[in-house]
Amino acid sequence: MDEPYKKEGRVYLIGAGPGDPKLLTLRGQECIQEADVIIYDYLANDQLLDFAKPGAEIIYAGKRRGNRAISQDQINDLMVHRARKGLVVVRLKGGDPFIFGRGGEEAVALADAGVAFEVVPGVTSACGVPAYAGIPLTHRDYSALVILTTGHEDPSKPHSDIPWENISPGRGTLLFFMGITNLKGVVANLIKHGRDPKTPVAIICWGTRPEQETVVGLLENIVDKIQERHLALPGMIVVGEVVRLREKLNWFETRPLFGRRILVTRPEKQASDFSAELLRYGAEPVEFPTIRVVPPEDWTNLDMAISKIGSYDWIIFTSINGVRFFKDRLWVAGKDVRALNGAKVCAIGPRTADAVRQLGIVPDLIPKIYQAEG
């Protein structure tokens, strides 16, 4: 007798990108949608959890200012245990899992345990965050060299692994992950080992998110500037002449609604398009539906109006919901758009006009001003 099929578990080590949820890769989204278990970090945008299927187990494993929800060993054990039960596990990490994300350590733990895994690269913060701050890491006129390193080494190590004497001199771009808390030491080492104190520096906090904040200075004064601003972690340090280009290339923080959080109270099914428009202008939309559209208890008035539809000169639609209910009752009456019998149609607002067009009707009038007072 054949043994019952046992589903093989696996782990996806996914880079969630630097913060903006739209920077998640298509492969990353596919894996999240497939997952039975999702273990996510502090720097992974929790909006990505919206892709999870119903019933998926969600486990927070973040670390903030030295306080970790669960230890690294516990994370490794969780992944191995759930995968051995035949489950699909997603390990969701900020940026790219193999660039200062401890993804390499987790992959080794999975390999040692004989657990199948796949690495899904993410948009690393190394390029995503400076790009959103208007800072290219390379430029033919400024820098042909980029060095990525950490500004926060393992405190248990007896000596630093950063070769300050090699990376400090010259004109290349230096990028430090997680370096704000040790900014004073980073600056001191760079100047001590040959970097010009007049070198431009940018500190970028919460890069690619609506709360992104960037401070620009020079090596000789950036510590004082940061102390004045009290920036929130996490942050990244960019050192080099390319920082000067931010003055021309700062596209993200100059959008008209940047830094504003806007409450969207529209019904849930009608909020997404408006929220997307707010995002395009730099705002952070917070969807909080306070309106619920329900059919009336009595359709008599609308049904009577539809029974006389051919006698009207104008039919005015003021909302998408009005179009939807009109279509439904028109069908109930056994009629279609031919019953309008030449009546002109007015649609209040472009979204309402789109809904009217979906009925096969081209609006005769769409007012340019469509506010309640008008």
Image: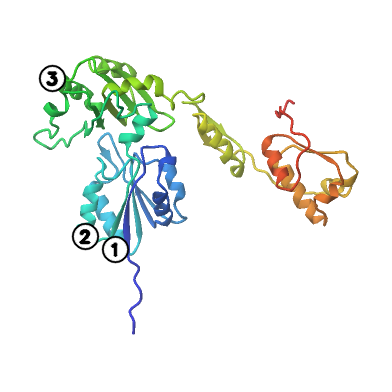
Residue placed at 70% from the left, 34% from the top? 349
Q: Is residue 206 visible?
A: no
Q: Which of the pair 214/36 is nearer the observer?
A: 214
Location of residue 343 (image quadrant): top right
Residue for badge 1: 84
Q: Which of the pair 139/157 is nearer the observer?
A: 139
Apparent side of residue 369 relative to residue 34 in the rendered image (left or right)? right
Residue placed at 17% from the left, 22% from the top? 190
Q: Are marks 2 and 1 in contact (CB under 8 Å)?
A: yes
Q: Are marks 3 and 2 in contact (CB under 8 Å)?
A: no
Residue for badge 3: 192
Residue for badge 2: 113
Report the Cα–Cα distance between label 3 and label 1.
Answer: 52 Å
Q: Is residue 309 above or below residue 277?
A: below
Q: Is residue 289 above or below residue 247?
A: below
Residue placed at 12% from the left, 31% from the top? 163
Location of residue 333 (image quadrant): bottom right
Question: Furthest-left residue in view?
Answer: 158
Mark 1 or mark 2, which is nearer the start of the sequence? 1
Assign a secondary structure to mark 1.
helix
Numbered disc total: 3
Image x and y of residue 123, in percent: 35, 41
Q: Which of the pair 302/24 is nearer the observer?
A: 24
Image x and y of residue 175, in percent: 25, 30
Q: Which of the pair 282/146 is nearer the observer?
A: 146
Location of residue 231 (image quadrant): top left
Tag 3: residue type? Lys
Mark 1 or mark 3, which is nearer the start of the sequence? 1
Apparent side of residue 81 relative to residue 296 in the rendered image (left or right)? left
